[in-house]
Structure formats: structure tokens, C-alpha cells
Image: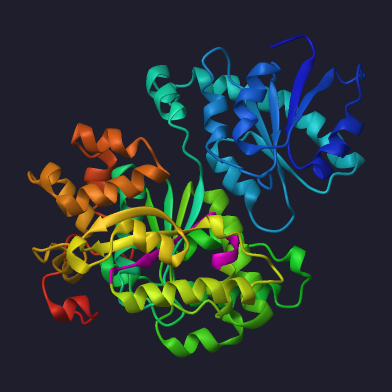
Amino acid sequence: MTERIRLLVAAPFAEAQPVIAAFRPQNALGIDVATICQHGPSVQADALEHGADVVLLSPLLPGYDGEVISRLARNPERPIAVIGLVPPSGDWGLTMGRAGAQGYVETPLDAARAQQIAGLIPRAIKEAYAGRASGAYIPQLDPRVAAAITAQGYQRQTVAVWSPKGGVGKTTVAVNLAVLLGVVANRPTLIVDGNMVGGHVAHFLNLRPQRTLHHLATLFQAEFGDREPDAAQLGPSTLREHTTHFGGNLDALAGILRQEQASEAALRGRQGARFVKALLETAGRMYEFVVIDLGSSFNNVIHRGVLLYSHLVLTVADTDRTTLSDVRNSIQAMVTAFQEEGVDLDRFQILLNRFDPGAGFSRGEIARYVGLTEYGCIDREVNGAMIRAVNTGYPFVLETFASRERKRDPILRSYVAVGTTIFPPLATIYDNGRLPRRARTGARGGRRRGMVSGPSRGLGQLLGRQP
């Protein structure tokens, strides 16, 4: 640590300005602002480059990643303390504290709160060094492992799985992709059942959730229904309380139980639009990957919001010409319907599911016809393994990954290829042939109430009747 304390302010510029004003160069407090960081993925590198002793970190920073708090604490040369700059609504202070931050101050900042930062800094640095000395300190990842993952360049993403045609396997794709990311790769992942016609993610994962998307939307309406749109923020702990843990690092937000719930005020109109935006913003900060299973209509306000705000929209289609025609027509209609908001069609990519090369269409022909780039292709199954996985509630990719036939299964290879495009280290895990330890132990024994341990053994149990 230098004689004068050096701060990195990792926050949107409007939040950073009061800090700069409070800690002007050569101030009597002995605290200098080294630099401002405006991009979440750059926080750690900027802190090291500028020799920061303390990072003032806002969860509203674009690309915010809460894991950077522990990475800064594990910096090999010396720990770097973190103080949160948190919005007044929500419970980001508590969430950042659990992640390892040494304190927080609410924004917007005024002179008194700026002085509060000055008082927190010495204690924060002391606590950071005390944590390094404790027996609970966990060393940093092997630098070679960290470098390998960094070199493969994955990004946090919200991925929507959508199709204008029912029955093409949207939920199957969404569930197996989420399991690859959250259990096999063991990355923090949330799967959201956003199908407003009535989804089945909970059945596919054999979960019995106590709370659902409908409960969360109703609570959001009660708390923020009369407030200005910018004040409507969903707290991290509120979202987590409505999720059900599956295993590894995968949580699920179950969907509506009955189709009529989609027509309630909490999930339609302006209120529904505010809710889905707040949900995606909070989930995107809490999880590295958010996978959302959607219903077919792009006019539904929840579906519409997800399609507009997701980083990637996997548009699922099979080789049936009616499906391909529906995809082509819907994409064209969507451009018109979303004209006011604007639609970036580069985010929409086609995912061929159950592809049959004998159906008469080549993959290139399909992509050209629908007007979308192909993201991936999942082969057609022939042994019924996928439907068995649905009926047992134990995901296909997880069951198959642990089998001796893993390397010979074309469906698993197809899914791994799609997942690797999102998270490249998944290919290394697949080639290595072993699930991470936490994935193996967590997948069948959930940590949170709502998970059923192991596959279900009967139709009654699957449909929710008590054995």
C-alpha cells in the first residue's frame, strides 16, 4: 500500500463525479482517486494497473460481476478492499457484503456520504488484510487455469430460447443448455420459465417450487406499482427467494401455473414491461448466464421484453417446412411490430433442433430461407433418451454426461457444441470426461427446499401428487 491511499471508482459517471469532487488531488485526507472504470469486466485489470488500494464498486456498472470482489481479495501481491456504492432501493449492500465487500454507502452521494467513505476506507483495508491472514482464505486459482479460461473469452449473457411454433423443443433446449452451463460447467446460472402460455421447466427439472414468476411479479407490482419507472428495481434477495435450486450452480425461476395468470395486471401492459426489465437487469448482475424459455407469441409483453433485452435469441426450428415458414414470417412481422424499439436481428440466430438430413433441406438452405445465421444444430435422436429424461425429470445432458457412452452420443455432442459457443471452457470439461465435483454431488441433492432428489419414479409423482 502506498503512503497515500489510491481509489478506483468503478461506477457510472454520474455516481463517480461526487467521489472525484470529495477527493481532489492532494487533499488533506490522504486519499486520491487513481482512475474511473466504466466497464465491469475491466475492474480487476484497472485496479491492478493503477495500484488501487480500495475499489468503490457500483452494482449498476455495465457488465457488473459480483465475483470480482473475491478476486480482488485474492490478488496474489496484496488484497484490494471493496466498498459498495449501492442504490437506495433493493438490498445490494447486503448482497455485496456476502460476496466479500468491506462496507457500502448508498447513492446518490452528498458531502456527508462522501465523508462516510473516507471513514470506511481505513477499516476496509484493515479487514481485507485480516481476511488474507485468516484460515478461511481461499487461494487464487492456478494462474494457468485462470489464463486458459480468460483466453477463451466468454461473456456473461442473457439467452432467450424462442420459436413462433410450438412443439419444436424450446423447453428441452433451454433446460439442457442451462444444465450444461450451471451444473456441468458449474457457472452461476438461472433458468427462467417465461412461457406465458404455461411452461414446463419445473417438470423437466423435477422441481416442486414454492414460489413462481407469478408470485414475484405480484410482489413487484405491490411494491413498485405507483413509482416512477426508474425507481422500480428488483432486489437480489427477493429474486433469490423466488428461485428453486436444482444442483451445482443452477437455480430456476418457475413459470406461471395456469395460463390465466398471464392476463393479470402484474404480468401485462406497462406493469408487465417494467417487471420483465427489472427482472432481467437484476438476474444479469447476479448470474453469469440467464437462460429464458419463452412462449411462441412475440406480442405478449413478457415475451416481448425478453426478446428486446436478451443478448442472444436462439430461434428454435426443426426441419418441418411449416415451422420454417412460421419462423421466416414471424421474423419479418417482428421487425414491423418492434419498429419503435428497433430490433437487432444479429441477436436472433437459428438453432436447428432434431435436425434430420433426410428431410429434404440442407442446413445452409434453412438459414438462407429464414434469413438468420445458424447458431448450432442438434441432431435427431433415435433411441427415446430425450423423452425418458423429460419423464424422469433428470436432464438428458446430465444423465448422458455421466454415462460410458458419453463420447459416442451425437445428441450430447450437439448440445456441448452449442454450449461451448456461449462458454468455451465447456469443451475442455467434455474432453476431460469428468463433471466438476460440486456438479456431481449437487445435481441430485438440492440445497434448497423445492428440489426432488433423483429422478421421479412414477407418473403421479411427476404430475405433483404425493406418493
Q: Nearer the viewer, residue 427 or 329?
A: 329
Q: What stretch is highlighted in magenta?
A: 306-319
Judge by depth and name the residue closer to the eye, 83 or 41: 41
Q: Which residue is drawn at 34% across and 49% down?
A: 418
Residue 251, image quadrant: bottom left
Any part of residue 252 in sight: yes
Number of numbered discs on residues: 0
Give the residue displayed 61% in from the left and 57% down from the top: 281
Q: Is residue 316 magenta?
A: yes
- Look at the image and tell me whether residue 138 can be seen: no
Quarter where residue 224 is shown = bottom right
Q: Where is residue 269 in the image (x, y as percent from the top left)?
A: 65, 82
Q: Name the residue located 31 percent from the left edge and 58 percent from the top edge.
A: 363
How was this image coloured?
rainbow
The quarter in which the C terminus is drawn is: bottom left
- Residue in the foreground of this view, choosing between 341 and 180: 341
Residue at x 7% of width, y 44% of height: 404
- Residue 451, position as x, y percentages in the image: 29, 63
Q: Is residue 331 left or right of residue 258?
A: right
* Residue 56 falls inside the magenta stretch: no
Residue farthest to the top? 3
Task: Using the image, determine if residue 392 lies above or below residue 122.
Answer: below
x, y percent for residue 409: 13, 49
Viewed as shown, does residue 373 lie left or right of 118?
left
Asked if residue 437 is positioned above or below residue 118 in the image, the reply reads below
Image coordinates for residue 271, horizontal then vertical, percent: 66, 78
In the image, is 354 to the left or to the right of 269?
left
Q: Left of 437 or right of it: where is 385?
A: left
